[in-house]
Each structure stands twice: as C-alpha cells, then as structure tokens.
Image (cartoon, helix red, strand yellow):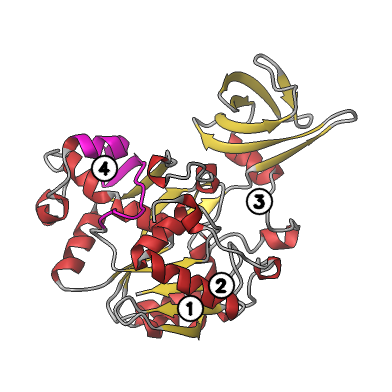
Amino acid sequence: MFSLSDYNYSLPSELIAQTPANPPESCKLLVYDKETWVIQDKIFSSFPKLIDPKTLVIFNNSKVLKARIPLWSSNWNGEIFFLKQLDEYRFEAMVGGRKFKVGSTIDLNEEVSFFVESIIFEWRILHCNKPILEVLERCGNMPLPPYITHTKEKEKHYQAVTAKHPGSVAAPTASLHFTDDLIQQIKDQWSIIRYTTLHIGTGTFKPVLDEDITKHAIHEERIIMKQSMFQDIEQAKNTDINILTVGTTVTRSLESLVYVYVLIKNDKNFQYASDFRDDLAKDITPEKARSIISELQIIWASITFDSRVYIYPGFEFTVIDQLLTNFHLPMTSLLMLVAWFVWYDQVMKIYQHAIQQEYQFYSFGDAMLLR
C-alpha cells in the first residue's frame, strides 16, 4: 500500500474516453458499497435514487479558464500556459520558447502583449497590458488533458454546469456528468446542495515519482468556502446525514477543514466556532495544522486558505461519508485517495471490474459512486 508500484494498472487505450457521453447523464455509473463490498453497474441518470434523501451533496464550483494562449509569428511558435493569477494584470505561467527572458516583451497581437518580470523555477511571472482573465477568455484555448485529442467541439464539454468562479486549469471531472435537471432532482428529494471553490492547478497532474509514496511532496491548492460550511457539516454529523463529495477536489477541501478549525477556532471573526465538534479535530496539534494549511484568511462570511492535505493509506477521514468520482490515472495521488477511502485491495478489484466491463476512463469517462 505504500509503494508506488502498488497503484499501477494496465488500461487498454480504447478505454481512455475521447468524448463525453451525450447526454452527460447517460454514462455508466459503477456503484460500490463499502459495507457489503458489492459492485453494481448502473447508469448515471439513476444517481439521485442511489443516494439517501437529505444527503449533503457538495460540488466544486470552480470554473476552468481558457488557460492555453497560442503564440504564432513568422519564425517562432510557442505557448503561454496560465497557472495562477497574482493580480488583475500579473500571473504565473509556463511558457514555451527561449524568447521569454527577463525584461523581454512578447506580443500576442497589436493590442495584447506580455512583459516577463521574473523567472521562478520552471515558470515565469508575466505582466499583461490588459486584464489577464479577459485576454484568456478572448484569446485562450481550453486546457484539455494531453490524453484527449483536442478539438474546439470538445472544449464545450470541459466545463461543468456548476462552474461559477474562474480559476482552474483542469475541470473537476466528477461534476461533468450533471445537468441542471439532475441537480434539481437531487434537491426535490430534500437533499442539500452546497459548494466549495477549489481552483485546480497543474499540480493535480504531478506524478508521484518516489517509490515510497510517503515521501511525495503533495501539491498545494487554493480553497474558498463559506464559513457556514462548518455548520452544515456539524448538522449532518449530529443527524446522521451522509456527506457526499462530488470529486476528489471537494474531498480534499472538506478533509482540510479540521486543520483549519484548529487554527481559527478562537478567532473572533469565526462565526461558527461553537457549532463545530471539537472531537473531529481532537488529535490535531496546531503544528500539524500549520504544516498543511497556509495563507489562511477570514474575509466576511468566507474562509480562504491553501491546503497541502495528502490522503493516502493511514489518513483518517473525519468529514466525508460517500464519494462520487471518475476513474483516475495509475500511480497518482488521486488514485491513492480513492484507494484509502474504500481500502486498497477493494479499489483494485473495482478498477479491474470496470476494465472488464469496458467502462470509459479519465476526464471524459464514466463515474463511480463509493458509498
């Protein structure tokens, strides 16, 4: 369970989804029961009937940016890949081409140009003469994963109906299966829908390289959510309502909250300190919390923080009860998260079943509900 090779599996190339199901809810849904170890093959449109009424269902409402800016000239081709916004005009980016030297200016067209402020490791800090989010929307391409053959038509499907706040360079793919009608069906059965915002960066694709997975330096992600999420979790725990996360990004968000709580429970600006159960964070020291949570801010009714929570064998889940997710690439931290949620031996059986039943894998692929 602690060796990288334990998380490898062989996947036929024809099972890597190149296009999403149409309509989205017509894709396959593998349902796994953690208590009985039973696997069922369903259709995603049956999802509302497969969860208990009054389930607390939480989505990531981050919106994927058109993060790839292609550059063409008569003697040079290159690309700017947006990573992180620093202010309205400045941002971090990966770039292609030797012309991106400190102090140089790169023209996109007659109106838009980029000035190279500095080089930090393998990326650059660029200053755009126009608001960068406007430039991305007007000139950028959707950053489809490299295993998907890129077309403009496919870009249209790489944005969830729940997307609201721009900032991600990859989609929270578990959300791609939902339609407005399906979300309304969930609400109609008295389930509660809430949202967190986790802006997915390129770190989500960072491979685990060390054979000893405990030595992996997990990527950091920015998370924004309402303070009232603490109250929602507390009420669910006190009334035995299931907490279901739509995707691994939401799982990381919610499982980060016990560490956040340790750091802010005595802050006068934290409105819900008395509503959250201390026992959920009883074994977490402030030192441990600070090693995982940084850049923590309470802004009005919201909380913003960066999280380095790493979920692999030995991690103690304190918040979530059920998980909806896609099928992940081998030897990745996302697969390790899922493996520990259902136990390692079981997730390998689930994946082999999915391969035998010709499920579609990865971003545009089918889904599984772990309950």
Chain part drawn in magenta: 287-316
Q: Which residue is mark 2?
A: 366
**Circle 4 sits on which residue?**
300
- Label 4 crowd bin: few (<14), some (14–19), many (20+), radius 10 Å: few
Residue type pointed to by label 4: Trp
Residue 179 in view: no
Q: Which mark is residue 156?
A: none
Lower sequence index among marks 2 and 3: 3
| Cα–Cα gap, marks 4 and 2 | 39 Å
Q: Of callouts 1 and 4, which one flags the residue occurring earlier in the amino acid sequence?
A: 1
Residue 60 in picture, x, y percent from top left? 43, 57
Query: Which residue is located at x 56 percent, y 72 percent?
Result: 366
Q: Which residue is mark 3?
A: 142
Q: Is residue 288 magenta?
A: yes
**For the residues marked 2 and 1, what is the alpha-carbon distance in whole angstroms?**
8 Å
Q: Position of residue 243 (x, y in %)?
A: 29, 68
Mark 2 vs 1: CB contact within 8 A: yes
Q: Tags 2 and 3 in contact by the CB under 8 Å rule?
A: no
Q: Which mark is residue 30?
A: 1
- Report the Cα–Cα distance between label 1 and label 4: 40 Å
Task: Tally the numbered discs.
Answer: 4
- Tell me which residue sits at (37%, 59%) in the image: 195
